Image (cartoon, rainbow, N blue to C red):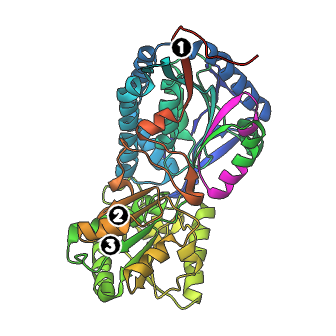
């Protein structure tokens, strides 16, 4: 058992210690404390915002080349410490080592891609026309507040850090207390590659969050998390009409068409992974599966076989484990309550996979993944975002019904359609979602070169791609008229 580590806030380039701290436990073994984070005050948040505001004056005037150079050095620092960060993330979060390594890979991949497109996205657009010349610039917005959740802390912090800083903004970040350690270490490394005040980090409770989303010096709020929290942030940010990017909850559907080959083992494994990677704790994971009634029974049988082959539940450091514990007790109890409610409604619950170590399973926040069958379309486990290792599988009779079931949701983050490509594409065009994937889903179908975000109550704005960088800028139009006679304007 490793010694607990302590992370600190970073304000204006300096580590800030606090009287109060909080502990982060190992979800595989809650008696083990992985580390401690600070409980910052509202005053700390204000200091961080003010430091970012002061640093913005000079940072906004730096060249894009300098910003890219510093960002590349930060990337190199992360890569050099990747093994240590991955192990720390695995211990505090509960995701297996391969999964934490995958997050680390996506993190630096996006940062490098953002660097590669920054000059093109941020360059001036100049148009010569009969009235003169117009220059359209992309100016930084100012101080950015970035608040991100525990499920992918490295990726969901740098998805904001890279575009914000490359565009010339400064930033104040707040992590979740459920996975604060690895990301704080990563942010500390990155901050050292930039001038003081460009990157600031605070931890804390709701008063800190309110300050980060309401302070008049904050120009933009970038938030990833739950829809209800996103609504509160919009209300708080409305006081000064802040620019907001909100990536919120999702209840992503997978539609299995009648021409899907249930004997395609690779496709079936992709589907299983799209349901249960990171113990189902991903906003874009497939959380409800609709299967055409003509293949329903064969699909369920093949799915269970594929799941039993891939799913191995246990300690994240065990080399054979594919699924670790649920991140925290509160989330575990919520997911279990949805399954129990479904059982009480008459649903059939089918356990999936194997448990690698029964003793470890019983001491941690583990839950055996399961399918939920014979459940009503309006049951809570279907209409709510489970964010855990369970998924309902429901039959449908025709294409119109499937599309109606998918779209009958307040959410619209991602979706997937599985079957013959032309048929799947036709269905995909009618689904209300920010992203629809064909014959793949979740992380397996994510492409950081293209925009990502939701519709309806799954969010506002886009991250990743060129749009994810331009979201941290404001358009500035400069008009230069042709010198000549003014039009005849009446006095």
Residue 229 lies, in percent from the top left, at 68, 53
- The answer to whether any part of residue 143 appears in the image is yes
Please give the residue where the numbered disc 2 appears in the rendered image: 273
- Residue drawn 72% across the image and 19% down it: 490
In reply to whether residue 469 is colored magenta, the answer given is no
Please give the residue where the numbered disc 1 appears in the rendered image: 480
Please give the residue where the numbered disc 3 appears in the rendered image: 307
- Is 160 placed above or below 298 here? above
- The answer to whether any part of residue 356 appears in the image is no
Where disc 2 sits, the SS reads helix
- Residue drawn 41% across the image and 42% down it: 86
Q: Give whichever of discs 3 and 1 has the lower sequence position.
A: 3
Q: Is residue 353 left or right of residue 385?
A: left
Q: Compare residues 365 and 433 and report the one nearer the observer.
A: 433
Magenta stretch: give its range.
Answer: 213-233
Q: Is residue 254 left or right of residue 387?
A: left
Mark 3 → mark 1, Cα distance in angstroms: 64 Å
């Amino acid at each position: 058992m490793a010694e607990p580590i302590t992370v600190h806030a970073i304000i204006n380039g300096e580590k800030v210690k606090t009287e109060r701290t909080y502990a982060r436990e190992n979800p595989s073994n809650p008696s083990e404390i992985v580390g401690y984070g600070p409980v910052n005050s509202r005053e700390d948040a204000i200091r961080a915002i003010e430091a970012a505001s002061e640093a913005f004056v000079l940072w906004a005037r730096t060249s894009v080349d300098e910003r890219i150079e510093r960002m590349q050095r930060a990337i190199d620092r992360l890569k050099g410490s990747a093994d240590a960060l991955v192990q720390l993330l695995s211990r505090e979060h509960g995701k297996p080592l391969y999964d934490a390594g995958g997050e680390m890979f996506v993190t630096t991949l996006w940062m490098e891609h953002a660097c590669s497109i920054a000059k093109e996205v941020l360059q001036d657009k100049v148009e010569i026309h009969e009235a003169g010349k117009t220059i359209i610039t992309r100016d930084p917005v100012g101080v950015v507040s970035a608040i991100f959740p525990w499920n992918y802390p490295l990726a969901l912090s740098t998805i904001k850090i890279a575009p914000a800083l490359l565009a010339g903004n400064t930033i104040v970040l707040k992590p979740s207390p459920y996975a604060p350690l690895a990301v704080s270490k990563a942010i500390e490394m990155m901050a050292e590659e930039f001038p003081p005040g460009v990157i600031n980090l605070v931890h804390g409770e709701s008063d800190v969050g309110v300050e980060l989303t309401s302070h008049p010096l904050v120009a933009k709020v970038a938030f990833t998390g739950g829809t209800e929290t996103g609504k509160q942030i919009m209300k708080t940010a409305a006081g000064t009409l802040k620019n907001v990017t909100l990536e919120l909850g999702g209840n992503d559907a997978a539609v299995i068409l009648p021409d899907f080959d249930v004997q395609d083992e690779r496709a079936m494994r992709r589907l299983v992974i799209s349901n249960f990677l990171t113990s189902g704790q991903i906003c874009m994971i497939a959380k409800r599966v609709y299967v055409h009634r003509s293949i329903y029974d064969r699909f369920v049988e093949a799915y269970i076989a594929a799941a039993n082959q891939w799913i191995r539940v246990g300690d994240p450091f065990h080399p054979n484990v594919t699924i670790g514990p649920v991140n925290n007790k509160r989330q575990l109890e919520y997911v279990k309550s949805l399954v129990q409610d479904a059982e009480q409604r008459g649903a059939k619950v089918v356990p999936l996979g194997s448990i690698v170590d029964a003793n470890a399973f019983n001491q941690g926040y583990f839950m055996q993944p399961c399918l939920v069958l014979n459940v009503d379309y309006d049951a809570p486990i279907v209409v709510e975002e489970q964010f855990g290792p369970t998924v309902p599988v429901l039959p449908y009779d025709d294409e119109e019904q499937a599309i109606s079931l998918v779209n009958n949701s307040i959410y619209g983050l991602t979706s997937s359609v599985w079957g013959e490509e032309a048929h799947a594409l036709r269905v995909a065009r009618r689904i209300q979602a920010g992203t629809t994937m064909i014959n793949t889903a979740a992380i397996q179908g994510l492409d950081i070169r293209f925009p990502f975000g939701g519709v309806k109550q799954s969010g506002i704005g886009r991250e990743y791609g060129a749009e994810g960088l331009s979201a941290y800028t404001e358009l500035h139009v400069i008009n230069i008229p042709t010198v000549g006679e003014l039009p005849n304007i009446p006095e």
